[in-house]
Image: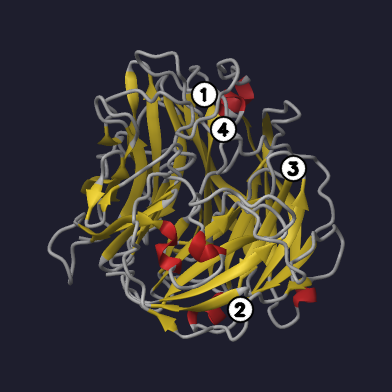
Amino acid sequence: MLASSERNSLVQGVTPNTITVHTNERHDVSASLGDQSTKSTNAHKSPTPSPSTNNVEQRSPGNRPSAEIVASFDGLGYGFGGPQGVANVRNPSDNSLAVGPDHIVQIVNTRMAVFTKKGKRYETTGKILYGPVVTNAVFAGFGGPCETRNNGDAVVRYDQLAGRWLIVMPLFGRAPKRPDQPREAKSGEPAQASPPGRPNQPGAPFQLVTPATPNPTNPNRAGAATVGDGPYSMCYAVSRTSDPLGEYYRYEFLRAYFPDYPRPAVWPDGYYVPTSTSDNLIQKHACVVDRNQMLRGLPATEQCFIIDGVNFLNNADIDGFGVPPRGAPNIMMAAGGAQLNKILGDDVILAWKFHVDWKKPANTKLDGPQRISVSPYQYLCGGQLTNCVPQPGTETRLDAQGDKIMARLVYRKVNGHESVVAVHSVAASSGGGGVRWYEFRLDKTRSPTVYQQGTYAPDNFYRWMASPAIDKKGNIGIGYSFGGSPNYPGQRFAGRLVNDPLGELTTQENVLIEGEGSQSVMRWEDYTQTAMDPSDDCTIWYVGDYLKKGAQFYSSRIGAFRFPGCGK
């Protein structure tokens, strides 16, 4: 996400949606993979929640034994080294993590790395196999800006339904203007197509090698943004097998709108990728690309809705192997409130049903928003890009991104029902910060309804920037940042078993990593991330940041957790 990102505003009336269809700009197959800071104004103190806000607040920790920590090791970050040298990192980290049968893939903004996972193929977890390298290494030989421009905000997912890896990299700079580029669609217009930008695609498979300069001095994108009226791009790489060091199909889709903060989600009929279009406009792109075509390495298309007046969007991302009914729409959600309008809380979560029709794009539709009543909440520290979480030994406070639902929005079909779990950071009655979490269940009309909700705030410290997961038993695990003086910022984990009292995280809190130092800039991570292990569908992986003693920048910590009674 950009340094200034967007100060979200939510307008109660949502304008009519526009669908934009993008054909693939280019795609082919690759082969084997062998401080930016933002100054904010005054420090924010979280407003004291009203009594009604606290009726779901959990003010004491759980008493069940904590989840078992089955792995813990450092990932990309300050001083991290591997076969391709030492990582050159920047703030914020924009952590992304995916886990397959034998590998762990991490992307931190503009750098990627591949690690071993203990199992049939490797004897240990956490050994670096590839990296750190620039993220656009996966697009070498592809041509065009996906190859030539290394950009931040890249994200990795493992599609456990197909046994494939998905890497999504947005391009924030405009390419040179071209006569066939997509125009800016207007609200209410029918579906539009962007013509392919490269002939004879998909092209021949390409052998991907270690880049000549795997870690250039500039940790950001490799070159200045092209100023002008040309298109932006979204770059996709889909592996041909479950080996992230193998071959990839690559695609580029031209975008008329700035593609900030992509949050890809796996669904049977597509990869859903919402983005934000501007720092100054309250406008979102809700996009989906044809997953089935991409998995086969065939020409694919992308369809996008333009939505005005909403907060950051997240699409439901499948945990496990249970799938929704054929043709079921994807669920998409956003928090309420309006930071730009100084509306720093709400009592609803907004939800949409996103149905895609690949044969007749005019039939693609987005139903909503459904306004789901929840316990009132207030953004932690008034939203995003605020000086929020105090640190010992410094006046610098950390951003909480308190205005938005954080990735991932998790879907799980389990125990005869379909659940969707969402999390965001809220002000706690103690004056600190808590993790608000919800479990929604889909009814017969496939509309989400609240099954349970809670705010995990067992003391007066700060818990924020969470990411959830649901294991195959229906247990819910949530990783999050922890801090507040006298604690240096670090990472923790808590959860609940499926039959525990509703609205409570009942396990004792795990400490994945204690921070050892304070960060000198306000931006903190932007997001953390969970990932389910496809090998047992029980182990929940998680990544987040901390600072080592005396370090100039963050390190990331990758951990794996397992609840009693699930898996080994």
> Residue flagged by tag 3: what amino acid is it?
Ile
Q: Residue at x 38, y 30 (%)?
A: 482
Q: Which mark is residue 428?
A: 1
- Report how far apart the C-alphas of labels 4 and 2 lie in the structure: 36 Å
Residue 283 can be seen, yes or no: yes
Residue 501 vs residue 567, the one in the foreground = 567
Choose the circle earlier in sequence order: 3 or 2. Answer: 3
Q: Quadrant of residue 257?
A: bottom right
Q: Amino acid at mark 4?
A: Gly
**Residue 556 at x, y percent in the picture:** 32, 42
Q: Position of residue 565 (x, y in %)?
A: 25, 55
- CA distance separating discs 1 and 2: 46 Å
Please report whichever mark, 1 or 2, sits nearer to the chain's N-terminal start: 2
Q: Is 222 rendered above or below residue 209?
A: above
Q: Please tell me which of labels 4 and 3 falls first in the chain.
A: 3
Q: Residues within 10 Å of mark 3 (few under 14, many from 20)?
A: many
Q: CA distance from mark 3 to mark 1?
A: 27 Å
Q: Residue 282, which numbered label?
A: 3
Q: Are marks 4 and 1 in contact (CB under 8 Å)?
A: no
Q: Are marks 4 and 2 in contact (CB under 8 Å)?
A: no
**Relative side of 313 to 164, left or right:** right
